[in-house]
Amino acid sequence: MRVWSRAGTVAVAIAVVAAVPGCQDNKGANADPKALTYWASQQSPSVERDKEILKPELRKFTERTGIRVNLEVIPFTDLLNRILTATTSGKGPDVINLGNSWAPSLQATGALVEWDDAMMAKIGGAKRFTPVSLQTGGAEGQTPTSVPLYSKVYQLYYNKKLFERAGIAKPPATWKDFVTTARKLTKDTDGDGRTDQWGLGVRGQASTIAVHYAYILGSARGAEFFAGDKPTFDSPAAVEGIQQYLSWMGKDKIVNPSDAENADWADVYEAFADDRIGMMLVQTLGQTLKDYDLTDKDYGIAPMPAGTGPGRKNVGSFLGGTNAAILKSTDNMDGATELIKFLTGPQEQVTLNAAYGTIPPVKDAKGKAFETEEAKIARQTMATRAIPLPRVPQETQFETLIGNAVVNWLSDTATGKQPGDEQISSALEDASAKVSAGG
């Protein structure tokens, strides 16, 4: 899932679209069997860079099929609203990209083509995809309405120079060791009496990142955030997971309190590159750190630490990423299906995921770009330690309410006022009631 700053209106917008009678039956403006319109999500640092990556590949598709592709690259900050508008107007594209955590909510609009066994057979069959990536295609128990395109998982990145200076031989494998390691990295390096090097950097102002940590840490403790489609946010395990995150800045003091104001990952990457933080917990970075003149001599990658003790589950990440879908309003179903077959083919999966630094969700996409230590760890996490975000229509409400709450609690923690369990549990109970009531 990418950051979307207007997530607070998502659930309402989707509910309105779902209520429009027959909106999914409107026909689009494209009636040319030799042309398609494709809305691609921005995956690289700029829209122009995405076009540089995609246009040569789409020309290959045209050469093979004779079908022209009108490409528009849309930032994730705008994409969901654009999709919702298209489903109501009937004048949208043929093929879209979507953040995979949106899939259940968008499925509820009825505007997306179902990928049943017959449709899947047209792109090589469901068995080509990793099982956990297929789970992101829609709501649990329903026929998926999108297919995986690019995948990411959370990993631990560590600064080799700072580890060596602190006498740390290897990255931590458990959360207990993680805190111990981070404390060794947190220090006053210039002797002025103030900490200027920290064990961990976080992007504290991003509600999406906050809910990611809450979900991963809570799930690893056994939290179930929905029972069917009933919200159950306020379990003791969920509270413990949120407290674990807040404690890194609060009780454990391994995160700079000013990180509560970090609005962009660039703030964290710059601190990492400048040797001001020793570790980051972020989704697969691929080429990103090279933009900061860092190589594998400067940093290492390890799996997310694991919990220990009774009731712990082997959860290290949710599966993030981007899916592809076809709008029912298309007048070129065959061409749209061919485009998704092309994009999910083994060669294109290698080319595109290598360019974006993401991990192919298809099993037959292999290449040197995915033989790095980073890619191997990511694929191992995908196979054994990744779970999807809640596969329910209310998922966007969950992200909004819990993410914003955790951001606010982190801000309080930065001022020395880390909330107690009772305060967190009460707020989570209220959030559950709000989602249950459709608010």
Image (cartoon, helix red, strand yellow):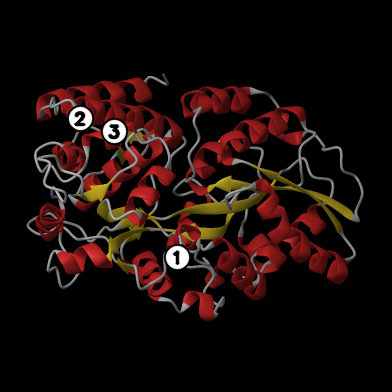
Q: Label 2 crowding class (10 Å Cα cut-off): few <14, some 14-19, many 20+? A: many
Is 156 rendered above or below residue 225?
Answer: below
| Mark 2 in CB contact with mark 1 (< 8 angstroms) | no
Q: Earlier in the sequence, mark 2 or mark 1?
A: 1
Indicate the secondary structure of the residue bearing disc 2. Answer: helix
Q: Label 1 crowding class (10 Å Cα cut-off): few <14, some 14-19, many 20+? A: some
Label of residue 408 in the image: none
| Mark 2 in CB contact with mark 3 (< 8 angstroms) | yes
Label of residue 260 in the image: 3
Asked if residue 171 shows in the view, the reply is no
Type of amino acid at the residue the image marks with label 3: Ala
| Mark 3 in CB contact with mark 1 (< 8 angstroms) | no
Residue 299, percent across and down?
Answer: 33, 66
Q: Earlier in the sequence, mark 2 or mark 3?
A: 3
Q: Residue at x 46, y 62 (%)?
A: 293
* 144 horizontally vs 113: left or right: left
Q: Residue at x 30, y 24 (%)?
A: 431
- Residue underneath mark 2: 414
Q: Residue at x 31, y 53 (%)?
A: 281
Residue 221, percent across and down?
Answer: 17, 50
For marks 3 and 1, give the CA distance.
36 Å
Indicate the secondary structure of the residue bearing disc 3. Answer: helix
Label of residue 131 in the image: 1
Indicate the secondary structure of the residue bearing disc 1. Answer: helix
